[in-house]
Image (cartoon, rainbow, N blue to C red):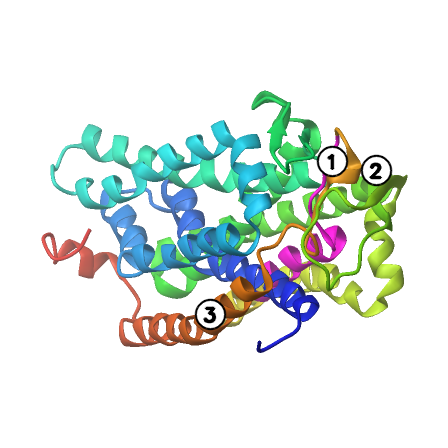
Amino acid sequence: MIFDYETLKLLWWLIIGILLIGFAITDGMDMGVAMLLRLVGKTDSERRTVINTIGAHWDGNQVWFITAGGALFAAWPMVYAAAFSGFYFAMLLVLFALFFRPLAFDYRSKIETDRWRNNWDWALFCGSAIPALVFGVAFGNLFLGVPFNIDNFLRASYQGSFFGLLNPFGLLAGLISITMLMGHAGMWLQLRTDSDVAKRSGQYGRYALIAFMLLFASAGVWVANMDGYQIVSMPDTQSYANPIGKMVTTAPGAWLDNYTAMPLTIIFPALGFAMATLALLFSKMGRPGLGLLSSSVMLVGVIMTAGVSLFPFVMPSSNNPNVSLTMWDAVSSHMTLNVMFVAVAIFIPLILFYTTWCYVKMWRKVTVKEIENNTHGSY
């Protein structure tokens, strides 16, 4: 064995966090671009310019999403089972929304009529905004607790409904997801386009960043005053996974306990606010490259804030807190985590390398003039 069981459990919490961050920075940016499409592109040529800034990368960026889903299934099978039964209709909604993205990219420019292209523009918007909203809503509901139970045979059963997920705090988290991705995408478009498109992209990106900071602060105040989960007792973290072998209680403000126990972790919410502010300032100064770097670090701060706040919980249960799933007891076997770690140690660097290589080799500004002169070789 490469690592002991406890170390591997912690490593896989970090690895899944890294995959979610990679997904937010890359494919989340594509979603943000699609959500900004009709705001920053006033003519068909301008919208094609916007689409072509991500045309070479959007499908490759989805590797992060697919890999994160596969890692969740293999490393945390109990979480995967409970989440996909509990969020079944939400996940189906995301899946069907995602169908629109490849169709819109491939078919939008096939016919030169306004109605055809406008319909596909809206399809691209819906195929990006719906997943961004649902992912945020799902994360928000983790803080509230998910209505599921686990019996003595370790079978998960969900007692909630799809509309139950659409509560005020869940919707707030969904709006945070949408605004932070739109702000990140605004920096990207300001960097990759020119003239009026770049100007509008920076403007709407800054609006989104301001909205994000207000919503993120509101969520922080809300979390500080809601009931959080605390582990009272549990088996040794080196022991085999047993999600029904612990005692959990709830207490007001408990989601902030980790920041008291580990003061250095306060850096993550601070990064969320500080990097959003820097991105806004760099955009205003006409330095979108630094703005994009700042917004990328902002996403790291936001996702790690959620992870640290929930730690070690992965999927708390509102029906029976004692069966809440944690990173210690909802995992695969020691051998499985070891074998998967070897695979990840090989393939994540490869993904990072070819993603970086693709961006470097295909880096350029996409201009309206170029798009108008290239009616067949671009989207």
Distance between the alpha carbons at the discs numbered 2 and 1: 8 Å
Q: What residue type is labelled 1?
A: Leu
Pointers 3 and 2 in contact (C-beta within 8 Å): no
Mark 2 residue element: loop
Labels 2 and 1: the sequence-earlier one: 1
291 relative position to 259: left or right: left
Return the x and y of residue 86 as percentages of the image width and height. 57, 31
Distance between the alpha carbons at the discs numbered 3 and 1: 32 Å
Rendered position, 256 above or below 43? below
Residue at the image point whose x is 55% and y is 64% from the top: 337
Is residue 142 rendered magenta in the image?
no
14 relative position to 28: left or right: right
Residue at the image point whose x is 61% and y is 27% from the top: 158
Question: Residue under circle 3?
Answer: 344
Question: Residue under circle 2?
Answer: 226
Return the x and y of residue 371 as percentages of the image width and height. 19, 56
Rendered position, 308 above or below 126? below
Q: What residue type is labelled 2?
A: Met
Pointers 3 and 1 in contact (C-beta within 8 Å): no
Can you tell which mark lies on residue 144?
A: 1
Residue at the image point whose x is 77% and y is 32% from the top: 320
Residue at the image point whose x is 32% and y is 34% from the top: 123
Is residue 308 rendered magenta in the image?
yes
Q: Give the range drawn in magenta.
A: 297-318
Q: Which amino acid does label 3 sit on?
A: Val
User: From where the camera sits, is residue 99 visible?
Assistant: yes
Name the main secondary structure of what is drawn in magenta. helix
Front residue of this view, candidates 319 and 195: 319
Mark 3 residue element: helix
Labels 3 and 1: the sequence-earlier one: 1
Mark 1 residue element: helix
